[in-house]
Amino acid sequence: MEFAKQSVVITGGAGGLGKKAAQLFGEQGAYVIIADINSEQGEQVAAELGKTGMNIDFVQVNVADETSVQALMEAVKQKAGRLDILINNAGITQDSMLHTLTKEKWEQVIAINLTGVYLCTKAAVPLMLENGYGRIINTSSVVGLYGNIGQTNYAATKAGIIGLTKTWAKELGGKGITVNAVAPGFIRTPMTEAVPGKILEMMRAKVPVQRLGEPEDIARAYMFLASPHSSYINGAVLSVDGGVVL
């Protein structure tokens, strides 16, 4: 029970990578708060995991709204009394080639993927400082490292997250709080299920380990960076991509 007595907030925790992370942290004894804008799905996941004996709660949040984020952290304080781990996992895509990318799509992705990370982290840090301990894990992407056609807005946010991670690592490392990022590659999620099989096969063929990643691959990276085993890792970007960017 590696995370017994620790509290974890996972934004975007109602589906995909976040749901698997909630499950694995719950299995290791953590008190997990799933924070998501989708209340129906979030409550369903919390109830589903709770039936297995895990200590799971759901709090609705819009990570792009400062008032909503502050309410989330107040709920964390009331429910858990402390915050040990924040996983900034919430994110969206609005793909488009540059010449057709609207300002609305640009701003939607920036608001959730980048401003949301800033707002959640800023609100979480005071709770961590109360105990002189914290683990902040931000979800970037290989797209943030190397770019991708048709993802101007998404790539900008994921590259921006790397900049935030390295800056906060310098600001907070001396206060007992480490900040790291995970950069997933091609991961099998509900989002990729909508991709045609031929495209998925092309994606798989590009990966040296010859498979798409699974949500568990990313969730275990989160767990490693949140664990005592990573106490000397700060400001790092861990690529979990099967070697696709080599």
Image: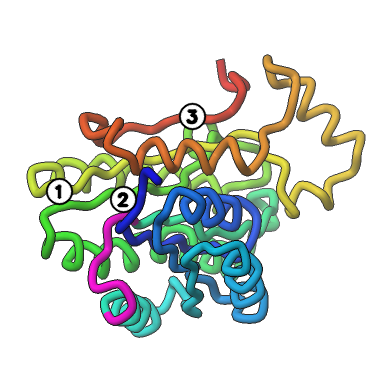
- Specify which label sits upstream in the sequence, 1 or 3: 1
Q: Can residue 141 be seen in this view?
A: yes
- The residue pinned by badge 3 equals 239
Q: Residue at x 28, y 81 (%)?
A: 78
Would you call the spot at circle 3 few (<14 residues within 10 Å), some (14-19), or many (20 or more)? many
Q: Is residue 143 visible?
A: no
- The residue pinned by badge 1 equals 172
* Range of magenta residues: 78-85
- Of the residues shown, which amino acid type is indicated by label 3? Ser
Q: Quadrant of residue 126?
A: bottom left
Q: Is-magenta flag for residue 66? A: no
Look at the numbered disc 2 and give the secondary structure of its residue. strand
- 183 on left or right of 70: right
Q: Report if the CB atoms under discs 2 and 1 are less than 8 Å apart.
A: yes
On screen, residue 47 above or below 197: below
Look at the numbered disc 1 and give the secondary structure of its residue. helix
On screen, residue 206 above or below 167: above
Q: Is-magenta flag for residue 83? A: yes
Q: How far apart are marks 2 and 1 (CA)?
A: 10 Å
- 118 on left or right of 25: left
Q: Distance between the residues labelled 1 and 3?
A: 22 Å
- Of the residues shown, which amino acid type is indicated by label 2? Ile
- State the image coordinates of residue 14 (x, y, percent, origin top left): 60, 65
- The residue pinned by badge 2 equals 136
Quadrant position of the C terminus in the picture = top right
On screen, residue 197 above or below 242: below
139 and 1: which is toward the camera: 1
Q: Which residue is drawn at 44% across and 63% down?
A: 32
Q: How far apart are marks 2 and 3 (CA)?
A: 16 Å
- Of the residues shown, which amino acid type is indicated by label 1? Leu
Q: Which residue is drawn at 82% across and 49% down?
A: 193
Would you call the spot at circle 1 few (<14 residues within 10 Å), some (14-19), or many (20 or more)? some
